Amino acid sequence: MAEPFITTAIHAARSAGALLKENFGKDLKVNEMQDHDIKLELDVRSQALIAGILLDAHPGHAFFGEEGIEGDQDSPYQWIVDPIDGTVNYFYSIPHFCVSIGLRHQGKIIAGVIYDPLLDELFQVEKGKGAQLNGHPIHVSQRQLKDAVITIGFSKDKASIDAGLERYKQIAYSVRKTRVFGSAALALAYIACGRLDAYIEEQISIWDIAAGWLLIEEAGGIVEVRVSPVKTGKQAIIAANRTIDLSDIPRD
């Protein structure tokens, strides 16, 4: 019998996390240096490790990662993976990054894991079973907008940066504080456990948000994902606790 999906995801996330922790703060091989992003050789290695574990356990599944696809792309099951979410943080030895693994079945996300190896914090979720941090149930906050700490993402090109700056200007006066951390998956995980209250980004990829999307919903929050207004083929996201009315958060 195949092992449970969440068991496989946890094993893969912890294995990749161990690789990242071992190499954190060391000299790293850069595959590509872009204006607002960095592609590391370790991204590729981490994804290969994750893909090997997931597809060995579930060989009929599809795999869709930031560094490419593998497996049977006609499968109704698709693993969605960011092998290092927060690569720029990682490269600069900023201790805020994670591994994100989501599983989609017939277009619906049914399970996910987000793992921060430096803090050894493992967020896990299964559809209909609630959200957990290191085995303990978690829930979104109940703070209102005026008391909220909101994180705003700035992506990788001028249009998305301009949109993020405009969003920052519109929202900053309405909340207690704003923060920019550099990892979309951890932003969503932090909303799920009540550390943050909302997250906004105009240009994001599905591998950044797949696990965190379900994590927030199962923790009692709300996520709105739509077509990015600034980048074809990308998504925009607003995520929050349910006390905050999403209509009060400026967009577009």
Image: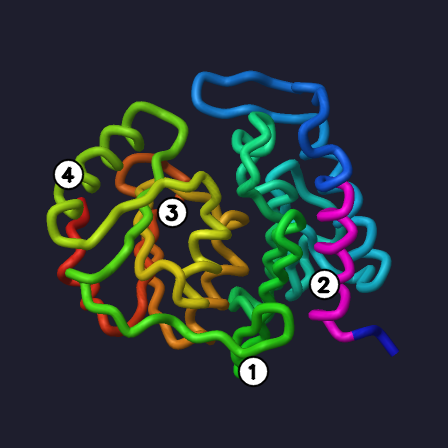
Does residue 134 belong to the magenta stretch? Answer: no
Q: Earlier in the sequence, mark 3 or mark 4?
A: 4
Q: Secondary structure at mark 2?
A: helix
Tell me which label, 3 or 2, sits earlier in the chain: 2
Q: Amino acid at mark 3?
A: Gln
Residue 169: give its label: 4
Instruction: Answer few, some or many: residues within 10 Å of disc 2's Cα (few below 14, many 20 plus, some between 14 and 19).
Output: many
**Mark whose residue sits in front, 3 or 2:** 2
**169 or 33: which is nearer to us?**
169
Whole-angstrom CA distance, mark 3 to mark 2, is 26 Å
Give the SS element for disc 3.
strand
Residue 7 location (% of width, % of height): 75, 70
Lower sequence index among marks 4 and 2 = 2
What segment carries the magenta color? Answer: 4-19
Amino acid tagged 4: Lys
Give the mark nearer the N terminus: 1 vs 3.
1
Q: What residue is pinned by disc 3?
A: 235
Q: Secondary structure at mark 4?
A: helix
